[in-house]
Image (spheres, rainbow, N blue to C red):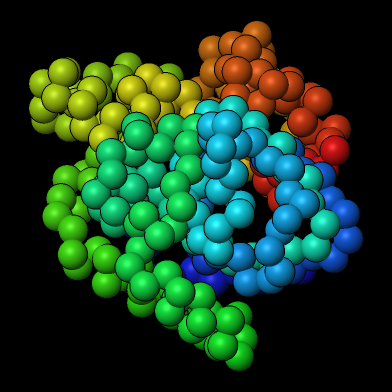
Amino acid sequence: MQIDLYIPQSLHHLVRGIWEQPSNGHMRWQILPSGCLELIFNLGEKMDHIQGQKVNDSFNPTENFCFLSGLHTKPLYMEFSNFHVMGVQMAPLAAKSLFGIPCSELKDWAIPGDQLLRHVAEIEDRLCGLPNFKSRAQYLEALIYRHIQEEQGLTEAIKIHQVVGLASKRKQNGSPIQLEDLTGYSRMHTFRLFKDWMGLPPSRTLALCQFTGAIDEMHVHDGQLTQIGLNQGYFDQPHFIRNFKEHARMTPGQYRSRMSFLPGQLPY
């Protein structure tokens, strides 16, 4: 399976990568929570036969050329035949920084692209007309960068992002954590900032970071799962298993036995 990846240096606080993936044949995937948002563009034929999680009884986001897949806290299940998509993988704070939407409103949700971006038809024409992956990725990088210039609050967003990284490190080291001390705000204001920028309360944000950290470590090291759990700040193996199952609906051992080369994406 071919996947191209571009890391936009101008968007390092908001965008983790821009990717493109074509695929032929029938596929079924279980997608675990990644702690990210995904802005998806369909460059191929309309995916009429996709079967994915609908966010309500009438809206299937994959029927649109472009849609924003929100902060998922449980697995998604997708089945399709043939596709060609590009995606912009973004940190949770991008929801408010780019689109003015509190990230908590995108928890386990999705939004059609024409509700977020102007001139979606023009974007489709440009992406489909560009000759290669790099030119398409750079076009999306410039498009997103222009949106940053139109929104306010990026400094506050970056501060919360940095607090999450620092708190995650302290949790891994077993150090006590008082997030309001790290933000410099009251406990209630810290809670509101996390809901706006990270999509979840502080404790659930850190739990999701632990889960995705464990996923990433399993793809880098083949060590004992108990040690991987301890490395991510879990108290013991039962704590690791319990938190992992809450996000993945499977144990760490079951994930390891099924994992593909793509972290958090499992054929089934």
120 lies left or right of 196: right
Tell me what residue is drawn at x 40 percent, y 60 percent: 114
Query: In the orientation shown, which residue stands out farthest toward the left?
Result: 185
Task: Tell me the quarter of the image containing the N terminus.
Answer: bottom right
Say whether residue 213 is visible.
no
Task: Tell me the quarter of the image containing the C terminus.
Answer: top right
Q: Is residue 123 above or below residue 231?
A: below
Q: Is residue 198 above or below residue 206?
A: below
Q: Quadrant of residue 152?
A: bottom left
Q: Nearer the viewer, residue 99 or 34?
A: 99
Tell me what residue is drawn at x 62 percent, y 12 percent: 242
Tell me what residue is drawn at x 64 percent, y 36 percent: 53
Query: In the orientation shown, which residue stands out farthest toward the front?
Result: 58
181 lies left or right of 201: left
Q: Is residue 135 above or below residue 158?
A: below
Say whether residue 102 is visible.
yes
The x and y percentages for residue 173 are 44, 26
Q: Is residue 61 above or below residue 268?
A: below
Tell me what residue is drawn at x 63 percent, y 71 percent: 43
Give the total number of marks visible in the rendering. 0
Query: In the orientation shown, which residue stands out farthest toward the top?
Result: 238
Q: Nearer the viewer, residue 103 or 176?
A: 103
The x and y percentages for residue 46 are 68, 64
The x and y percentages for residue 113 are 44, 58
Query: In the orientation shown, which residue stands out farthest toward the bottom?
Result: 131
The x and y percentages for residue 262 are 72, 51
